[in-house]
């Protein structure tokens, strides 16, 4: 499998705004021009991959997600099994992008577009998504610790 090393003129970036029940994806080319939008849920990841494949050659695809450990963990696992290249975009970068924009409104489509555009402007500040996923034991410990801390605050 060939993978995208950085970005090139054939790269198609798909930004995903991740939520608990539904997700919004926006695809852009290397110049930031929108190529399409897709809404999906974790129950329809097969259809999401079909949509991704319709955008172009898989080796040119790069999926960018802001939340890879929370609501996005199912997407990351599925796309990793499909050998789709992913990047984790820290939330602070999309927030900075929103504050610097003349259009500061929030919507799922606009947020997904911002996640994609962060890849174009701040690629070196993002991480491979699969490397940032906590393993099951780490998530269990973190969840237990969060519960313990919340209980102690009460």
Image: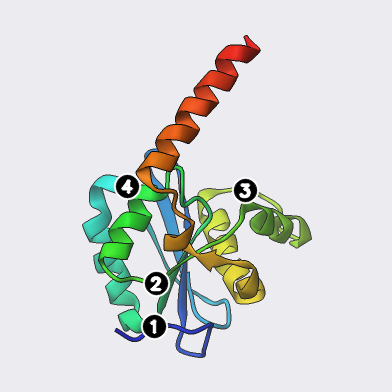
Q: Nearer the viewer, mark 2 or mark 4?
A: 2
Mark nearer the N terminus (1 vs 3): 1
Mark 4 Cα shell of 10 Å, populated few (<14), some (14-19), many (≥20): some
The quadrant in which residue 38 appears is: bottom left
Disc 4 from disc 1: Cα separation: 26 Å
The quadrant in which residue 154 appears is: top right
Question: SS at mark 3?
Answer: loop
Q: Nearer the viewer, residue 143 or 90?
A: 143
Q: Nearer the viewer, residue 44 or 86?
A: 86
- Contact (CB < 8 A) between labels 1 and 2? yes
- Give left or right: position of 76 versus 102: left
Q: Nearer the viewer, residue 106 or 42?
A: 42
Mark nearer the N terminus (1 vs 2): 1
What residue appears at the point 28 percent right and 74 percent down from the top-left corner? 53
What residue appears at the point 68 percent right and 53 percent down from the top-left corner? 92
Disc 4 from disc 3: Cα separation: 20 Å
Q: Which mark identifies residue 106?
A: 3
Q: Which residue carries the number 1 mark?
A: 3
Disc 1 from disc 3: Cα separation: 32 Å
Mark nearer the N terminus (2 vs 4): 4
Q: Which mark identifies residue 85?
A: 2
Disc 3 from disc 2: Cα separation: 26 Å
Question: SS at mark 4?
Answer: loop
Mark 2 Cα shell of 10 Å, populated few (<14), some (14-19), many (≥20): many
Disc 2 from disc 4: Cα separation: 19 Å
Where residue 1 appears, as percent x and y from the top left, is 29, 84
Q: Which mark identifies residue 41?
A: 4
- Contact (CB < 8 A) between labels 2 and 4? no
Mark nearer the N terminus (4 vs 1): 1
- Contact (CB < 8 A) between labels 4 and 3? no
Q: Nearer the viewer, mark 1 or mark 3?
A: 1
């Amino acid at each position: 499998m060939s993978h995208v090393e950085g970005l090139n003129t054939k790269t198609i970036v798909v930004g995903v705004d991740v939520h608990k029940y539904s997700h919004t994806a926006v695809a852009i080319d290397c110049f930031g021009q929108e190529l399409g939008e897709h809404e999906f849920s974790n129950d329809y990841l097969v259809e999401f991959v079909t949509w991704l494949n319709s955008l172009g050659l898989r080796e040119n695809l790069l999926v960018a997600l802001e939340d890879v450990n929370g609501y996005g963990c199912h997407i990351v696992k599925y796309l990793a099994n499909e050998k789709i290249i992913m990047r984790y975009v820290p939330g602070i970068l999309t927030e900075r992008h929103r504050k610097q924009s003349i259009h500061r409104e929030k919507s799922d489509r606009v947020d997904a577009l911002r996640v994609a555009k962060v890849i174009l402007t701040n690629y070196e500040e993002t991480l491979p998504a699969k490397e940032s996923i906590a393993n099951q034991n780490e998530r269990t410990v973190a969840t237990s610790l969060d519960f313990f801390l919340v209980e102690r605050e009460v």
